[in-house]
Every structure is written in C-alpha cells, then in structure tokens.
Image: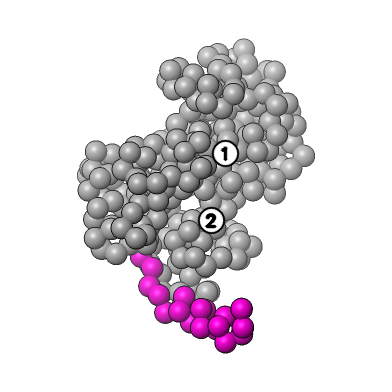
C-alpha cells in the first residue's frame, strides 16, 4: 500500500466513532471502560465504553435479548459479555467464530452488516497471560475449577498450553461431565482426594469476585508446590490468591487475561490493532 493510501486509511479509522459496552452482573468495579478508552485515546479514536450491569439495572439474563437489541439500535459496534451471560448469549447470535463454537460461549459480540457475530477471546487471553507469567509451570496434572462459560474457555486454553491431564470440578456435576466430554478431560468430585496429585489449579468460577466473596475450594487443601492461575481481576487479589501466595505457591492473577482478551476484543470492535504492552501498563496503573 502506498504511503498516501495508508494515511487515508488511518484518517478514515480515526474519523470513526465507536460505542461499545459490557453486559454482566455486578460489574461496577470493571476496569474495561477505562482500559479500552485509554487505548482508544492513545490511538486517536473516538470511543466510548458503557456498562450494562444486570444488578444495577435490576434485571436478569432473561433481559439479554432486549439489551442486545438496544445496543444495536443505538449504533454500538459491539459488546463484551461476562458472567452470567456468556453461554446464554449464544442462541441470540447469527454467526460464531470457530473458537466460540468450540467453547460454547461468547465474551465478545460484534454488530456488523445487520448481523451479530460471536467471538471468544478468553481462551487466547488466558493462554497468553499464562505463557507470560507461568511459562515453566508443570502441566502434567491440572485441576480446572468451574465448567461454565469461563471454564469452557480455560479448557480450550489448557489444550493450547499443553496440559496432559485436565480434571474438571464443578458443584454442578452434570455441567462438569458435559464439559469433560467436549474437552477430552476427566471429572473429579472430591477435591480432597484429587488435589494432592495435581500440580496446579485453574480457577474459572465467579467465587472470589467482589459480589461473590469466598473461595472455590477449601484453602487447607493447597500446598506450596501448587501453582494457582486465577481469572478474576476485580479484586485483583482474591482470597484464594492471597492464601496461595502466603503459602509460597506460584500464582497468576486475572489481570493479564483481562488485558489480553481486551486486546483482541478491541481489534474486533474497531479493526485497529491496539498496543498490548501499553494496555498492560495502563491496567497496572489502574
């Protein structure tokens, strides 16, 4: 492409306005609005990010069709989707990326040409963060906590990372079995028996979020030799991570995954590649 053509494309991109948002429950502490808007400002884009908090709106997942329609009518470029809507949004979409179809959940919806395109940036986001922070962690025997939308994404990420044996635990046994069948994994029902043989834990439940306090497993089961990878980023240090670090475990908080999934979502919304390192620095500053 000639220099004049490149400048023309850049000018066209900068002249566009992008409205995006996040649908989920209890998301007032989310850093996504500031993270996305700061990167857009650095790139010279007119960009706004709105929260559709089901709790603040006093509604539920049942209102998801209306919220999607509302965003479309208001000219949104797309939406991020989080707990508890990642799986519920699937029937409301026109097309799915291969990754979203494999995971059975979408965390990013793009509105384009009158259609809704579903994507999942959680799996590559988690994998990128894991490689950055726990690159040499042993992966022979790993337990995945949670078999919902986030758990499905981490099951895909586990295979991308080279996990040899993935064992899935969920309080909903049927959901754990369903995910295990899709992910070529096994199911565990007793963490007290299973955790001693595991090398690490991938935490994909909402337990530990600001509005879901607590821990997803009995803390007494953790040992210093375990590594713990968390997906929650508000708070950035969950009770599980705080205890694991005190024991001497190697840990990964949910910040890196949040940034790397946001990097891909930003690109999908705008068609412009963001600066991942700059977004990591801004997230840390937040």
The answer to whether the residue labelled 2 contacts the one labelled 1, judged by CB atoms less than 8 Å apart, is: no
Determine if residue 86 is in view.
yes
Query: Residue at the spot x=72%, y=30% of the render?
Result: 139
Horizontal placement of 57 versus 21: left or right? left
Residue under label 2, please give it: 264
Query: Residue 106's spot in the image, x, y percent?
Result: 43, 43
Q: Residue at x 61, y 78 (%)?
A: 1
**Stretch of the chain drawn in magenta:** 1-19
Q: Is residue 110 magenta?
A: no
In-front residue for pair 9/105: 9
Q: Residue at x 40, y 40 (%)?
A: 86
Q: Viewer-proximal residue, 34 or 83?
A: 83
Instruction: For marks 2 and 1, give the CA distance.
Output: 20 Å
**Residue lying furthest right in this view?**
136
Colour scheme in use: one colour
**Secondary-structure class at tag 2:** helix
Q: Secondary structure at mark 1?
A: strand
Which is the main secondary structure of the residues drawn in magenta? helix
In the image, taking residue 130 as reference, residue 285 lies left or right, namely left
- Say which residue label 1 marks: 230
Mark 1 Cα within 10 Å, few/some/many (few <14, many 20+)? many
Left or right of 248 on screen, residue 254: left
Left or right, residue 233 beside residue 33: right
**Of circles 2 and 1, which is in front?**
2
């Amino acid at each position: 492409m000639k220099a004049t053509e490149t400048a023309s494309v850049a000018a066209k991109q900068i002249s566009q306005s992008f409205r995006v948002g996040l649908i989920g429950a209890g998301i007032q502490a989310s850093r996504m609005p500031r993270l996305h808007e700061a990167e857009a400002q650095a790139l010279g884009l007119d960009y706004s990010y709105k929260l559709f908090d089901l709790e603040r709106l006093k509604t539920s997942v049942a209102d998801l069709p209306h919220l999607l329609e509302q965003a479309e009518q208001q000219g949104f470029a797309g939406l991020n989707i989080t707990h508890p809507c990642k799986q519920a949004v699937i029937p409301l979409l026109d097309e799915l990326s291969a990754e979203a179809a494999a995971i059975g959940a979408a965390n990013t919806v793009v509105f384009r040409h009158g259609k809704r395109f579903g994507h999942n940036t959680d799996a590559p986001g988690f994998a990128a963060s894991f490689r950055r922070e726990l690159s040499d962690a042993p992966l022979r025997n790993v337990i995945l906590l949670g078999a919902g939308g986030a758990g499905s994404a981490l099951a895909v990420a586990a295979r991308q990372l080279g996990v040899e044996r993935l064992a899935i635990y969920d309080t909903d046994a049927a959901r754990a079995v369903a995910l295990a069948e899709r992910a070529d994994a096994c199911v565990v029902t007793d963490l007290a028996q299973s955790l001693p043989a595991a090398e690490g834990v991938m935490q994909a439940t909402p337990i530990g979020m600001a509005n879901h306090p607590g821990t997803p497993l009995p803390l007494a089961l953790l040992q210093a030799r375990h590594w713990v990878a968390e997906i929650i980023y508000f708070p950035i240090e969950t009770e599980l991570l705080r205890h694991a670090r005190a024991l001497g475990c190697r840990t990964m908080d949910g910040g890196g995954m949040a940034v790397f999934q946001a990097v891909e979502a930003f690109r999908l919304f705008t068609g412009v590649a963001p600066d991942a390192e700059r977004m990591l620095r801004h997230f840390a500053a937040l």
